């Protein structure tokens, strides 16, 4: 059941109408049942994984809290993490290792027919596993008290709006809201409906159209120029951003209608002026998870070596998305990019603030943004489902066969898809308010909703593609 299918909205309408009639404790039990039903719609067999993950961490959390011996606390922490990581790594890595083992056997002339077992990747496994592991680590560190009510914790590990693709919630935020009474107000409804509509527009219009443009050129570069490849890279960059942030917006909107506040996951990442700032703005619930549970521990063990800690963290982020050679390459690429930036930042000549003329600072800022955006786009190429050799061929085309006229033609098409997004996000960034549109005058609201509605339903349809993170 996906956010872009009629079945989901029938399901959500029923959930909402029943939910508002119930008292707090009944609401939580009903949401737990609804969340399990939501996941079972895809495949009921994998409900056991969510249940095992949440149950293990719930009881390990209680055991950690009840024992005063640090060694016993650490044993229960290791037990919980081991169960979760074993399940996660089996489903995420089995096909990768079997496939490569088959290649090795064939290379040596051996039969590989018995190794053609295909393991299905459960939807959302990376998200709900990391969410419950984060809870367990926080309990071990003493940052939070363990959950006392079992059904509340099961809901924390399976809350349907963010179950399949995040945001990855912390117990301090989501579990606290589960335990306490929620308020459904008219303001919440307005914000929730706006987030849902904006998320659907991002996904159905921008992401899906950009996906078509990217696939046409990235999947088959024969006969394409370097300009074709470059624009397709831009298109994929906006596809992946609008796909993931669109899902988050819908998740936040549906949760808001139920009285929950989910974590903001993106803060205009393509406005970043350096690669480090980009990772502070991109999929923040994920990057902050890795910051707190990977970067800081590695930093401590590496005696303050921030370069190594950043490199390891970004490599882990890439492998979290998928276990493949392309993921390793992407992690290494971004790790090196961040290390180079910090090296430059540390050793660049210092100059007093405001010493350069205003136009120089403006041009420097633009150049920094331009370079950062292209570094990110190049990295996303290794997120696209093509081989590393294919990706290298595409990059070579950009520098060997570039036609400026083709670039301008394709950019006009791409801008038609992303213009509304760019204008709205510039407005939001200037006002420093995600909901500035809700506070503006009626004329601008009418223009926004008329234009986006016309683009969705009157400017041609796009393919109904699944969310990118459904394979993670």
Image: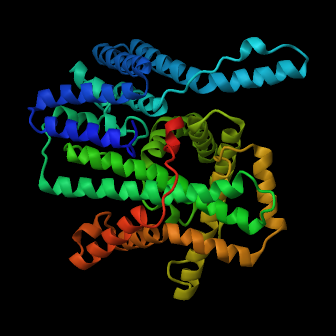
Looking at the picture, the colour scheme in use is: rainbow
Vertical order, 130 against 440 (above or below): above
The reply, left or right, for residue 137 in relation to residue 230 is: left
Q: Position of residue 103 (x, y in %)?
A: 81, 24
The reply, left or right, for residue 226 in relation to residue 166 is: right
Q: Position of residue 201 (x, y in %)?
A: 40, 59
| Quadrant position of residue 113 | top right
Quadrant containing the N terminus is top left
Q: Position of residue 180 (x, y in %)?
A: 15, 35
The foreground one among 254 and 6 is 6
From where the camera sits, is residue 430 visible?
yes
Vertical order, 160 against 203 (above or below): above
Residue drawn at point x = 70 percent, y = 41 percent: 326
The reply, left or right, for residue 291 in relation to residue 6 is: right
The foreground one among 196 and 178 is 196
| Quadrant position of residue 139 | top left
Among all residues in the image, which is located at the extreme right? 109
Residue drawn at point x = 23 percent, y = 30 percent: 31
Q: Position of residue 5 (x, y in %)?
A: 38, 43
Count of marks, rendered view: 0
Vertical order, 155 against 165 (above or below): above
Residue drawn at point x = 22 percent, y = 70 percent: 439
The foreground one among 255 and 9 is 9
Residue drawn at point x = 77 percent, y = 56 percent: 221
From where the camera sits, is residue 145 visible?
no
């Amino acid at each position: 059941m996906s956010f872009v299918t009629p079945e989901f909205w029938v399901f959500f309408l029923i959930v909402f109408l029943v939910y508002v009639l119930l008292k707090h404790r009944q609401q939580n039990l009903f949401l737990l049942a609804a969340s399990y039903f939501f996941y079972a719609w895809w495949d009921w067999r994998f409900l056991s994984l969510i249940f095992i993950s949440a149950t293990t961490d719930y009881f390990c959390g209680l055991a950690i809290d009840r024992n005063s011996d640090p060694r016993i606390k650490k044993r229960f922490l290791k037990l919980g993490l081991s169960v979760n990581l074993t399940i996660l790594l089996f489903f995420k890595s089995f096909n990768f290792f079997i496939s490569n083992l088959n290649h090795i056997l064939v290379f040596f002339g051996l039969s590989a027919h018995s190794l053609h077992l295909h393991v299905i990747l459960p939807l959302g496994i990376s998200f709900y596993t990391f969410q419950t592991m984060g809870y367990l680590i926080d309990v071990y560190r003493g940052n939070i008290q363990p959950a006392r009510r079992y059904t509340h914790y099961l809901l924390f590990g399976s809350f349907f709006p963010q179950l399949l693709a995040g945001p990855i919630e912390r117990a301090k935020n989501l579990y606290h809201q589960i335990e306490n009474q929620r308020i459904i107000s008219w303001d919440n409804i307005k914000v929730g409906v706006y987030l849902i509509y904006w998320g659907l527009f991002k996904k159905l219009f921008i992401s899906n159209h950009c996906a078509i443009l990217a696939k046409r050129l990235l999947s088959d570069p024969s006969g394409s120029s370097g300009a074709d490849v470059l624009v397709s890279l831009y298109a994929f960059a906006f596809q992946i951003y609008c796909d993931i942030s669109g899902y988050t917006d819908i998740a936040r909107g549906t949760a808001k209608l139920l009285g929950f506040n989910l974590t903001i996951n993106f803060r205009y990442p393509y406005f970043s002026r350096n690669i480090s700032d980009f990772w502070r703005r991109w999929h923040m619930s994920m990057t902050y998870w890795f910051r707190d549970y990977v970067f800081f521990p590695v930093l401590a063990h590496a005696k303050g070596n921030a370069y190594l800690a950043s490199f390891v963290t970004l490599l882990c982020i890439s492998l979290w998305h998928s276990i493949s050679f392309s993921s390793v390459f992407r992690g290494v690429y971004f790790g090196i990019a961040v290390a180079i930036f910090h090296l430059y930042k540390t050793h660049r000549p210092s100059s007093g603030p405001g010493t350069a003329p205003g136009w120089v600072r403006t041009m420097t800022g633009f150049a920094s943004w331009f370079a950062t955006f292209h570094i990110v786009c190049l990295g996303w190429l290794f997120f696209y489902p093509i081989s590393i050799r294919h990706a290298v061929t595409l990059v070579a085309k950009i520098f060997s066969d570039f036609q400026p006229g083709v670039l301008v033609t394709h950019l006009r098409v791409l801008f038609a898809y992303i213009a509304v997004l760019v204008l709205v996000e510039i407005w939001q960034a200037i006002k420093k308010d995600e909901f500035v549109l809700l506070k503006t005058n009626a004329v601008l609201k009418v223009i926004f909703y008329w234009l986006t509605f016309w683009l969705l339903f009157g400017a041609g349809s796009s393919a109904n593609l699944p969310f990118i993170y459904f394979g993670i």
